[in-house]
Amino acid sequence: MKIHFVGIGGIGMSALAQLHAMAGDEVTGSDRLINKGFTGLPIWKELKKLGVRIYPQDGSGIAEDTDAVILTSAIEPDNVEIQAAKKYSIPILHRSDLLAKHVKESKTIAISGTSGKSTTTAMLFEILRKAGKEPSLITGGVLLSLQQEGYFGNVYKGKSDILVIEADESDGTLVNYHPKIGVMLNLAKDHKELDILKGYFKKFSINCDKFIINAEEENLKEIGGKCKTFGLKTGDLTAENLQLDGFGSNFTVQGQSFRINLPGEHYVKDALGAISAALELGVTLEQCSKALEEFKGVYRRFNTIGKTDGVEVIDDFAHNPHKLAATLKAAHLRGKRVLAFFQPHAFTSVQLLLKEFIEEFTRQIKKDDILWLSEIYYAGGTIPEHISSKLIFEGLKHNGVPVKFLPCRNETAADIAAAAKPGDVVLVMGARDPTLTDFAKQIFRAIKDKDYSKKPCRQCLMNVDKKF
C-alpha cells in the first residue's frame, strides 16, 4: 500500500509510519513543522532511513495513487491535505483506526491513564523483552534503550504476536481498541471534562478481555468492575517497604526486592502496573525486578541534561497538572530548591485546566523555588481568543507564588542561569514543542559559562504575537 500520514512528526503517527515502512509499505507524510522550518529533527532522519518521503503540509505529498490518508484529531476539516485526499477520492482514516487494526491482529496489552502511560508501556515492553517474549511496541514515548540500539525508539517490531501499546485518551479514541489486557493507571481532568473521560475509560474497560486497575485512584473506583488491582498499599499487587530517594526507589513485591532508578512515587505506581500485566503473561517477579533495575527510561521523562557548579538541569515532558505535580515532587527529592520553567502546550489545555494549573503550582512551588512561565506553544491551527499563560501567571501572583512571565527564551535562559545556586535542580517542562530539549541545553550552557546576558530572540517560533 501507499500510505500518507498527515502530521507524521507526531510521536504516535511517526510510530505507525515507521511500522508500515518496516513492513514494506510505501509511506509518505507531511507536517506543519516542515512548513515552520524544522527540517533537521531526528525523526525526519529516521523516517528517511526507512524510505519515507517527507513533505510540507501543503497537499504536495498526496497523489492520485495514494491508497489511504491517515490523520489525527489535531487536523482541521479544512486542512489542505484533507482537501487533496477528497479531490482524489482517497480513503481517509483516523490514526486510532489504523492502530485498532494492529491491536486486533495481535495479542495486545494496552496501557491507559491520564499520566504515566509512556513510562509504563516502556517498562512492560522492557520486562517482556528481557523475559524472552519478543514483543512489538507502539508508543507515544521514545525508549532510551532502543535509541542506544539505533532505533528512533517509539516503535519496535518483535518476533511474537505480543504487542504493547499506549492507549491515548485525549480524543476518546481509546474506545476503538479491543486488547487482550488493558491497564488503567489513573484518571484526572485533562483534555476533556472528567465525566467525559470517565465514559471513555468505562467503554475501554468493557472492551478488554482482562483488565488491571490502580485500586487507589478515586476516579477509577466506579470504572473497575471485575478486574485485577494494584496500588502502593491497596490491591492484589502492592509495594511494601517503600523507600524513596532523589535518584529512585526501593521496594518489595511479595518478598521480591525491586530498585527503580527514577525518582518519585509516581514511577513506583507505573512499575506496579507494568508488573501486574507482565505476571498475566507468565513473567516471574524475579524477571520483572531485573528488567526494571536496568530500565533506562523514556526520552524527556526526568532526563538529566547535565550538572555543573552543583546545579543539575533536567528535561521533562510534564504538561498537565497531574504530571507537573509528580515531576515537581520528584525534583524536590533531588535538590535543595527547584527552578522550574513551564511552557503550556495548547491553548485549549490552559482554557480547560486554568484552575488546576494554579492550584497545583501553588501547592508544589515552595517559597524558595522560582517558576518561569512562557507563552503557550503554538503548533498551528485555530487559536482561541484571549487565552494566554498570563492567566496562570496572574493567578499565581495573586496566591503569592514566586513566578515570572518571560516570553523571550534567551532572556529566560539568562535569568534562570543567574538565579541558579549549588544544590538547585532546574526543570524544563512542557510538551509538543521539539525545541524544549535544546532550550534545556541552552540553560545548562548559560549556567556553565556564567553567561547572564539577555540578548533578545530574533525569532521565537514557539510564541504567538497576540493581543491580550
Image (cartoon, grey):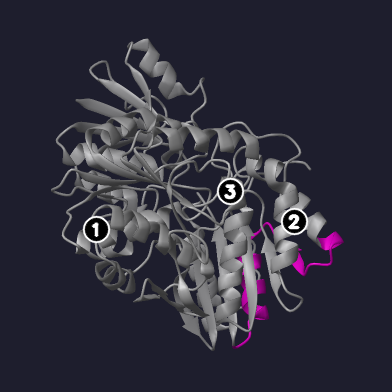
Q: Does 206 sit above or below residue 219? A: above
Residue to which mark 1 is pinned: 128
* Residue 324 image offset from top left, x and y in percent: 60, 60
Q: Sequence-wise, which precedes: disc 3 or disc 1?
A: 1
| Residue 395 pos. (x, y %) | 81, 55
Discs 2, 3 touching: Cβ within 8 Å: no
The verdict on residue 174 being magenta is no
- Name the residue at 65% across, 66% down: 412
CA gap, disc 3 and disc 1: 33 Å
Residue at (52% x, 69% y) in the render: 265
Question: Of 66 and 233, which appears nearest the observer?
Answer: 233
**Kind of residue sitting beneath label 3:** His
Could you say where residue 233 lies in the image, as x and y percent from the top left? 52, 66
Q: Quadrant of the C terminus?
A: top right
Front: mark 2 or 3: 2
The residue tagged 3 is 345
Q: Secondary structure at mark 2?
A: helix
Please provide the residue range marked out in magenta.
Answer: 397-422
Q: Nearer the viewer, residue 62 or 214?
A: 214
Q: Residue at x 32, y 51 (%)?
A: 154
Which mark is on residue 358?
2
Task: Work out whether 244 lies above or below 231.
Answer: below
The quarter in which the N terminus is drawn is top left
Given residues 369 and 167, the one toward you in this image is 167
Counting residues from the N terminus, which is met first, the one under dot 2 or under dot 3?
3
Residue 331 is left or right of residue 356, and the answer is: left
Instruction: Please indicate, yes or no, whether residue 405 appears anywhere in the rendered image.
Output: no
Q: Do the residues under discs 2 and 1 have CB atoms within 8 angstroms? A: no
Identify whether 76 is placed above or below 35.
above
Q: Is residue 356 left or right of residue 245?
A: right
